[in-house]
Amino acid sequence: MNYEELFGKSILLLGKTRSLNGIEFETLLKLHSITVEKSFTEGVSLIVEGKLMNPLEQNEGERLYELRAAPIVDITSVEKWLCTSIDPNRLLMSLKLSRDAQRLVDFIKNPYITDELFFKLLKLYDWQGEGLFDNDRNRDVTAAIIGRFYIDLERNHNVQYAMSGLAHLVEKYGNGELITAISQLSPIAKELKNPNDPTLKGVLDAIALHSDTPESLLRHLLKERANLIAYREPLALEKELLALDDETIQKSLAQNITLSQEGADLLEKKYPEFISRFTPLDEVRFERLLPQNGVYLASNISLNEAMQQRLMAMKSEIIFSALAQNPSLLLEHMEKLFALNQFDGELATNTSLSSYHLQKLYERGEDKTFKALSVNIATPVDILYQLSLDQRYERGVKTNAVFGKHIQTTNIGWN
């Protein structure tokens, strides 16, 4: 319905408002020269069904519906429309001047305001020196942050009221803007300056690991979470991390596929097995590492055709085993390993195998192969169904993300 056509007219509200309080609802309607009536009259052009309708209002709604007295709509669509007419600057100024904390919280909880306005409102909120869940208002604001950006909230509604829910939000649905906003919440900003609250550990760990966390924020986390930042992809603050000269951090860096070539040069002698497995290879580095690290090189996803041919020519079972699991393995080499009938368990883990080859592996029927197929996201669903019937492989199938998604999309129960 085009609500702009209600200009200069009146509506009847049955029940209560939902996302806007009554005063805000009527104030925004007045901007469109729309008035709210308490009972139905001939001048009412729209009937709005709100929440918490009492029995009298329910009866009135049913009566008016039967009479076809006027169009009837749910209040949700009206509130969505009204929220588009909010003047952000005027609202922000009003909230600053009034210092009405509850009104501010009500708008923060409103799902229909823009994200841009939402983030500006968050900056106005005073946490009163307490934690994210330490009082009712703080809890409401934190829950609003999680609830606004957490996808499929109806399946995980409890995450709104747990610190782990905020950490999971950052990990799964975070982006640069959201992560920055969360880092600026005073309980978290305070923790960044003076770490002493263990309940925030999971949130800050998630921020340190997230690929969209701004570099400026990572610098604040570097002292306490250097090892986590060293795992982060794409890698940031590489020079600062290398300068720490810490063995644990160096091991993490050596396993980071986004480590620079210069960083790899520095760490290659000390950790050749990690550099062989994870660093993108050029011909010079490959040749230098090959004599002693063939099995590690065979796991590197950056292997080109010439490198794969060199490794295949070595005719080493342990190298073949590693190549069989490498998703970058070329078809011609995969076919050779497949024909050997010796590396089925390894090939069954390879996510780049075709459905045809995965089916053939299933038909060969070995325990090691079945276990690998049960968790391989490339395994055809019909094979996963068959494997799920065997208790030995049921758990693997249940943890298979692709099979879980298939179950959800096909609306089939899974116990």
Image (cartoon, grey):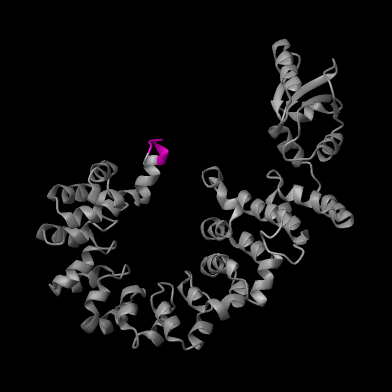
Query: Image quadrant of residue 38?
Result: top right
Give residue 407's position: percent from left, percent from top. Answer: 38, 40
- Residue appearing at x 63%, y 59% in the figure: 178
Who is closer to the viewer here, 401 or 140?
A: 140
> Relative to residue 312, is residue 205 drawn left or right?
right
| Magenta part of the chain | 408-413
Who is closer to the viewer here, 281 or 117?
A: 117
> Relative to residue 224, is residue 36 drawn left or right?
right
- Residue appearing at x 19%, y 50% in the figure: 357
Is residue 116 visible in this depiction of the protein?
A: no
Query: Image quadrant of residue 202?
Result: bottom right
Query: Image quadrant of residue 132?
Result: bottom right
Say whether residue 388 is magenta.
no
Which image quadrant: the N terminus? top right
Look at the magenta stretch and give its main secondary structure. loop
> Relative to residue 402, is residue 9 drawn left or right?
right
Who is closer to the viewer here, 235 or 305?
A: 235
Residue 212 versus residue 8 in the image, above or below: below
Give residue 111's position: percent from left, percent from top. Answer: 68, 45
- Residue appearing at x 65%, y 66% in the figure: 183
> Relative to residue 290, is residue 157 drawn left or right?
right
Give residue 298's position: percent from left, percent from top. Answer: 25, 71
